[in-house]
Structure formats: structure tokens, C-alpha cells
Amino acid sequence: MQLNVEGLSADKREVISSITERQKIDVICSEETHVDVDKTNRFSIAGFDLLAYSLHAKYVRDNISDAHHVGSSVCYDVIRIGSYHVAKIYKPPSENWGTTNTLPVLPHPSLLVGDFNSHHPDWRYQEPEEDCEMLQDWASGNDYHLIYDSNQRGTFHSARWKRDYSPDLCWVSSVNGRPQPASCTVLEDFPQSASTICDPCWSPLTSHERHQQTSTEFQESRLP
């Protein structure tokens, strides 16, 4: 599960724990926790171990033993669970893909998920950014496939423009043009502050902008 928490409070940790139980989540990739790295008690989520934290936090189920942190850079953290590599991506909207903000090329099977902040009509934006062409060149050059369903709502709602966008993307590795079988589902709204947490049935958010969490499911690969 990938989500932008915009501040990891105790109430939000309880909400995340509830969602992971309902959705049968094994890995959590969160961003914008806004928690100092030395305040470990503020990272705890019931049923999960904190595997890596640099700018953001990555968790795995506490009953998964074959998992570890592989490495980090300015815009990503990589973890490995069994034979699967998972990279959590975050590029600030004011920055571009380039020498500093680079994307990893990981062994197959691998998954890159997060807030890419790159605009392109292929994922709900009206006009492509020049910066986004670099992202697509990276994907095509390294045999990565975008998991995106235009029938689902966006992962971010802007009250200013009164529409959904999808800055949160999911890319999977491929072999000979055949992508790793996977699916990505946009879940319910995620609260931005404790005052918007009502009950498990969920109420509409009252803040100007809201994020939804996304869930990605890997299937066992049958590729050679």
C-alpha cells in the first residue's frame, strides 16, 4: 500500500492499521511523515515492522522474515521482500528528473511506486511536461510497464481545479516486453488531520485537497 500521510500522527497510524487489516496489506510505503528519525515511538503501526526510513517510511508485516533495506538516494528507498524489490519514489513537484533525481533500475521482479509528480495525459493530466518525457524514456529504456486504470478515480483531488489527478504511479519490471503480473487499486480517501477521522465507514474530507491510498497486488511470475 502506498499513501501520502502528510504527517504521521497517532490517529493516522490507527487508521492505517485498520486499512491494512481490511485490505490484507503486507507492505506499507508512506511519504511525508514529517517525523524526526530519532522519534521511533511515533512510527509504530500495529502488526508491522519499520524496515527503512529516510525521507519516508517503509513497513512490512511483522511475520515476514525475508525482508531488508537495500539502499536509498535523494528520491527513493529500496527494500527487498523475498525475490521482489520494491522502490518507494518521491520527487518534489518543484524538482525535475535528472542528475540528482534519478530512478533505480532493479532486478526483475521489481515494483516502483510513489508520488512521481510528473504530468502526462496517459495518467489523467491534460498536457505532458517535458520532464515527464524523461520518465517515459527511462521506463521504455529499462523495460518498465505502467500499471494504470483510467476507469479508477485519481489518487489526488484538487479543490482548486475541482478534479482528480494521479501523481502516484506504479511501474513494474518486464522480461522481453512481458510485464510482471500486477494490479493497482485506488482505495478510499485518507484523512489529512485527526479532526477528519470519523469512523470506519469514512466521511468525505473537509480539507481543500485530499489523497487516496493505493494498493498494489503482485501475482506469482510465470515468466522465464
Image (cartoon, rainbow, N blue to C red):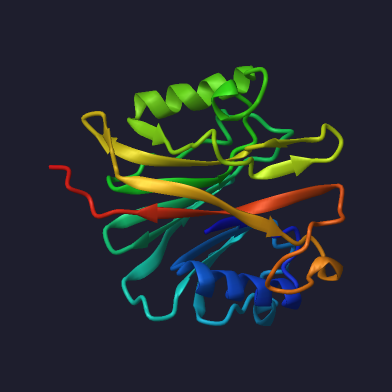
Which quadrant of the view contains residue 206? bottom right
- x, y (%) of residue 140? 38, 24
Residue lying at 74% horizontally and 42% vertically, measured from the top left: 157
Is residue 114 placed above or below 149 in the rendered structure? below
Which residue lies at the image location 32% right of the left edge and 56% below the top edge? Answer: 84
**Residue 178 picture location, percent across and down:** 25, 33
Foreground pick, 139 / 99: 139
Q: Residue furthest front?
A: 201
Residue 28 vertical placement versus 11 (above, below)? above
Quadrant of the rendering where the C terminus is positioned: top left
From this view, report whether residue 195 is shown above or below residue 207.
below
Where is residue 209 drawn, in percent x and y? 81, 47
Exactly how many numbered labels are in the figure? 0
Residue 55 in view: no
In the displayed structure, would residue 216 be above or below residue 135?
Answer: below
Q: Nearer the viewer, residue 160 or 153?
A: 153
